[in-house]
Amino acid sequence: MQKKVTYALIAVILIGIFAALVLLQGGSSTTGETLAKYDNVPLSQSALAELYPQSSTFSSIGIGAGSNYPHVVNATPVLYNGKPAVIYIGADYCPFCAAERWVLVIALSRFGNFSELHYMTSSASDVYPNTPTFTFYNSSYYSPYISFVEVEETTNKLNAAGTGYPILQVPAPLENATFYAFDQNASWLPQNERGGIPFIDFANYSVVDGANYNPTIIDGMNWSTILANLDNTNSSTTQAIIGSANLLTAQICNIDNNQPASVCDQQYIQNLKKVAQ
């Protein structure tokens, strides 16, 4: 009897430890309660490293299931701190921004490094609720080739009255000018799609209006599940995220004089540089 009690106690302890580890890794639960605990928690360096798939994955996927091709505007180049500027405008509540941040983080990580990137979920009150993602708010990014200018306009939680999301960042004149020129007043977009987020401007050479893939692909997942799929070339998640990241990578190569060569000289990237509307 004593051994049975001891084994039962050990089992309970092990189950508790396993549950704690699952929660720390992103969990198997996709409930808003579990995911929301990660909001604004910074990623560790090891977690950031997991976001960067093997080089062979990028080349094997190519364009994958990436869609919503960049639109070439070829306007006066925009620089920030003397380097071509990649300008992003989104918001923490936005599920389409949530999907696109996976793409943008992976693409940008091929040219530089993030620090203080934080976990985030999209709004629990919008479509595709609690989509696991990241937030650029309070993060920093350094690249010797480009500048990354980010705006997360609002939080992911409704105000007390339930009428809107509190403001985080207000776009500066530079960000507003590109947004209004190439999103709010974009002649190539249907009227009902203008003024939407996410919006990405590649130094006024090309822009992406909206997400490169539909959030349904990662709806109901958590970070661990998505990360575990990023090197699985047969996964629809990988096909969408890595294919889209390759598309954005090619646009960055278009504006930074094809640097670094280890990324931009790859044949599949050279091919994707021509994939634009």
Image (tube, rainbow, N blue to C red):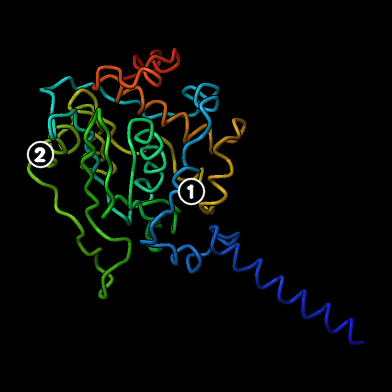
Left or right side of 204 for 247: right
Residue 277 appears in the rendering: no
Label 1: few (<14), some (14–19) or many (≥20) C-alpha neighbours in 10 Å: few
Q: Is residue 181 left or right of residue 196?
A: left
Report the residue at 73% width, 77% height from top: 12
Q: Position of residue 160 (x, y in %)?
A: 27, 75
The kind of residue on which mark 1 rests is Ser
Picture quadrant where residue 142 is located: top left
Position of residue 19 measured from the top left corner of the image (x, y, whole percent): 63, 68
Look at mark 2 in the image and give the residue it sits on.
Answer: 174
Where residue 61 appears, as percent x and y from the top left, is 53, 25
Q: Is residue 61 visible?
A: yes
SS category of the residue bearing label 2: helix
Q: Amino acid at mark 2?
A: Leu
- Residue at the image point whose x is 30% and y is 50% from the top: 136
User: Dot 2, crowdedness within 10 Å: few (<14), some or many (≥20)?
Assistant: few
Label 1 to label 2: alpha-carbon separation: 34 Å
Q: Earlier in the sequence, mark 1 or mark 2?
A: 1
Return the residue at label 1: 46
